[in-house]
Amino acid sequence: MDLSTVFHLPAIHDHHQAKTQRIHHALSQGTGRTVAAPTQSTAAAYALAHHVLEGAELAARNGDQDSFTWYAEHPDAGADRFTGAGGPLTVEPGAQALLTSAISDTPYYVLGPASQAAPEHLPKLTLDAASVAADHGFGDLIAGHAPVVVLLDGKPLGSPLRSWTISRMPGTVVLDYVPDNPVMVGRDLVHEAGHNWLNDALTATRCEIDNTQTFYSPWKKTHRPAYGFIHGCWSFSLVSLYVAAVLPTTSGETYTFLAAYLDRQRNQLRTVQPDHETALKTVADSTLRTKLRAVYRHALAL
């Protein structure tokens, strides 16, 4: 399966560019300053612009003029502080730095004036993980939809690993990690970047999913509206394809763990087969619907 054609959706690039320009325009209107054109890739500029938007809004609400001015002067959220590794911008802020808000119970992190680059070995870990993913066809997905990585806790292989994204911070992924194991980090980057891709694809194609009907999700062990169900089928299909591709390159504990993981995913993907096509009918854009169907079917055939 040629994943490069799956992830290629010009409407997403156009959406990234237009939204970044709107954020920068709003920032310049509020400060009277002209915002320079971003020097990052379109996807990275898009992710960083949302950090700036969130940070500036928070500063304004708190009456923090110094922070607001900093965001106005750094429309890239000070990205030059994190250059060097060449991979995703990587931070390890600690759980105490995560935020919640009235409209987001899920914790998230906002780059700001006090943000620091993660210790050198962690940007290297995310770079190596992105490289592993790219070797197996997921390079465009990671580059386009996980340019900012917020690392939480390092945990041993086999421990429960948390990872998530939130729609208000597109392009940013939050995850625990297995130290010195880029294959495992790559797995979770693929999973969370997949969520970001689908959110952007739905927005870019102006698809509004009808959530009237619910479907059983074996991953959440509950019935979910079509939106969440489709997200689960898509991201776990992608992860299954990644694990199947990378498994022959692994050995030892990593091989044993991922082989068992892939077996579980095969069973769970079979479980949703009767409902998947029904749920896809809620996706109005035919191109997007075809991509979601193709990835699921290839994962189902593993």
Image (cartoon, rainbow, N blue to C red):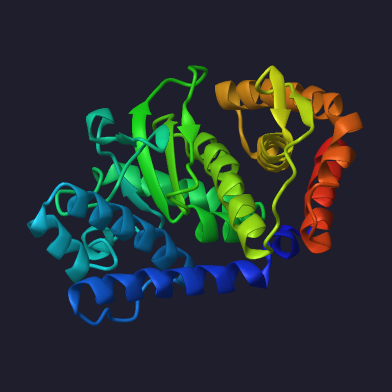
**Residue at the image position 54 percent from the left and 37 percent from the top:** 188
Whole-percent x, y for residue 99 in the image: 29, 36
Camera sees residue 274 = yes
Tally the numbered discs: 0
Camera sees residue 116 = no
**Residue at the image position 84 percent from the left and 61 percent from the top:** 286
Give the image quarter of residue 46.
bottom left
Whole-percent x, y for residue 45 in the image: 40, 67
User: Which quadrant holds the N terminus?
Assistant: bottom right
Classify residue 34 as left or right of residue 108.
Answer: left
Camera-nearest residue between 30 and 160: 30
Whole-percent x, y for residue 109 in the image: 32, 42
Identify the residue at the far right of this view.
274
Q: Is residue 62 above or below residue 269?
A: below
Whole-percent x, y for residue 200 in the image: 59, 57
**Residue at the image position 61 percent from the left and 34 percent from the top:** 250
**Residue at the image position 61 percent from the left and 29 percent from the top:** 251
Identify the residue at the far left of this view.
66
Classify residue 246 as left or right of residue 17.
Answer: right
Camera-nearest residue between 242 and 280: 280
User: Which quadrant holds the C terminus?
Assistant: top right
Q: Is residue 133 above or below residue 17?
A: above
